[in-house]
Amino acid sequence: MPGMVNVGMAELMVSQGEALCCRGLGSCVAVALWDAQARLGGLAHVMLPDSAAAPKAAQGGLGRYADLAVPELARGMRAQGAQMARLSARLVGGANMFSFVGRNPAAGPSVGERNISAVEAALAHLGIPVKARDIGGTWGRSIEFDPQDGSLLVRTTQHGQRRL
């Protein structure tokens, strides 16, 4: 695999050469976009579902919220030669890392579940199909994404590794 660049929390990156990785995904969702023809990939490390609930001063980078990160990642890929009609997505993360005994289901979905829903809604709005998912559960994940061939490796301590 070529050189590896870490995409940290609330960050996003587009690459045509270097592999991209996210380490320690818990409730965060990694959104990997790929244009096979352009051999171009992008990765966003989404922390929260919706920027509307955050005060402007606390919003942070464009990669922090699903509603901002997904369109910004697609825009960045188009700027480097990708075409929207050729983009596909893979999603990893969105775990419920803090499963409490006696958690009240009436409290609503966990942060991980809300992140997954928001990312999927943003992708659907842009017409980008989701080709694979490794989401939910109660365990963390790390990923390595190679934009040259589109390979995406998911690693976990509890469930080994798999390719999406």
Image (spheres, rainbow, N blue to C red):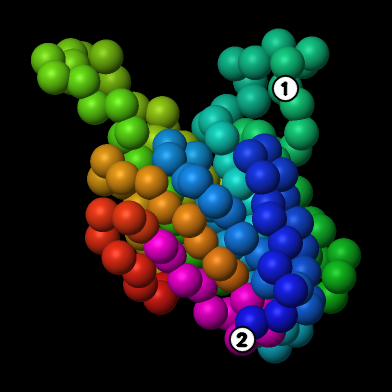
What stretch of residues is rendered in magenta? 146-155
| Residue at horizontal 65 percent and vertical 16 percent from the top | 54
Q: Position of residue 46 (x, y in %)?
A: 58, 41
Q: Position of residue 65 (x, y in %)?
A: 62, 34
Q: CA distance from mark 2 to mark 1?
A: 34 Å
Which residue is under mark 1? 59
Would you place residue 155 above or below residue 40 in this image? above
Q: Amino acid at mark 1?
A: Gln
Q: Earlier in the sequence, mark 2 or mark 1?
A: 1
User: Where is residue 24 shown, x and y percent of the image?
Assistant: 49, 46
Residue 144: give its label: none
Q: Callout 1 environment at 10 Å: few (<14), some (14 to 19), or many (20+)?
A: some
Q: Is residue 113 visible?
A: no
Considering only vertical position in the picture, is 129 above or below 99? Answer: below
Element marked by disc 2:
loop
Q: Secondary structure at mark 1?
A: loop
